[in-house]
Amino acid sequence: MDTQRDVLHPASVSKLRLAVVASICGLAATLVVTSPAVAAPAKAGARCAKVGATAVDAQGRTLVCTKTKKAKKPVWVVQSAPAAPAGPPYEWSGSWDRGWQRVRSTQPCPADLSQLFSRLPFDIGDVTSIRRPGYANPQSGYKPHAHVRYAPDDVDGRQVIVAPADGWLYAVGRYREAYTPGNDQVILDFFADCGVMWRFDHLRDGTLAPALASAVAPVEVREDSRTTRVTPVFVRAGDVIATGVGATSCEVGRPLCLPPGGPNFFVDFGVYDPRALNDASRRDPAYLAQSPGESFKGIALCWLDLFPASRSALDRVAEGESDYCRTS
């Protein structure tokens, strides 16, 4: 075997090492030159290069590069925020043959709506009874919502109501039912972006969370429970809605009164899905015709099903027959 061909001369080794190093350095230089730079998202208040340039931040807001008096160099300034929805995604047409009509695009709802309703809106430990939604009240007509009642002798009169899901307050009603100062009643209507709606009634005026109180303030107090559209206010699941419900006192003989004149703490809560008629409406063609003036009857849900983690506690205090809920 001719081993001379397999042995490199020391000088040749040095030249080879230099070539390898040069090659590696050249490759690294090439990588540095050709690798694209990744720009960090623009942030309000951060420095920017060119006055008048625009960018969009992580919250979807439009930023403009602006020279301000406070900053020596141009900084990003918020020009506009994403527009809130102009109103609810559905509107009531006034007749069951047309029903609720979608008026703006919606994102898909989860197949299991319990994934949307992540917070029970009240402390179940404070509740003495829940009249299941979907029943005919002999005195006041059909009730597609549930009637949630607190102990009449609740000494502190504080009943915290929270948002059950993310959504937009879009309509408000204020009305005088007990005819006593400090007990005006408030209705709040909310829509989730995917099109499911919920309503609270008999929230006590003066106990609303600040952002909601500001939206409610311009709405006049009526003698009836009609609602008025307001500029939408966004809430997240768990946000406090109000800290008082029903009436602290009332005139004997009025609807909110319990002898000898109060208090009477309760709240109405209903969940509605205008994307399709509910099971009760589909089972019986005559069902809707029995209550022609009740616009929520055909889309109301058994919201007790939407809170599986609290279902056993809800069932312990739930009572009455229901067109929407199982009762056994």
Image (cartoon, grey):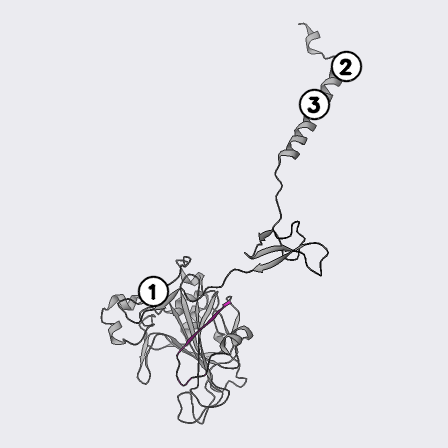
Q: Closer to the N terminus: mark 3 or mark 1?
A: 3
Query: Which image quarter is the C terminus in?
Result: bottom left
Report x, y in % for residue 65: 63, 54
Instruction: From the image, state whether disc 3 or disc 1 is nearer to you.
Output: 1
Residue 211 placement, left or right of 3:
left
Q: Residue at x 68, y 31 (%)?
A: 29
Mark 2 vs mark 3, CA separation in Å: 14 Å
The residue most toward the top is: 1
Q: Which element is circle 1 on? A: strand
User: Does the magenta portion include 280?
Assistant: no
- Distance from the alpha carbon under mark 3 to that under mark 1: 72 Å
Tell me the element at label 2: helix
Magenta stretch containing residue 231, yes or no? yes
Q: Which structural element holds mark 3?
A: helix
Q: Residue 244: x percent and y percent?
A: 51, 80
Image coords of residue 310 (percent x, y): 45, 68
What amino acid is at disc 1?
Answer: Gln
Q: Farthest residue toward the right?
A: 11
Q: Which residues are magenta?
A: 218-234
Residue 11: give its label.
2
The residue singled out by tag 1 in the image is: 101
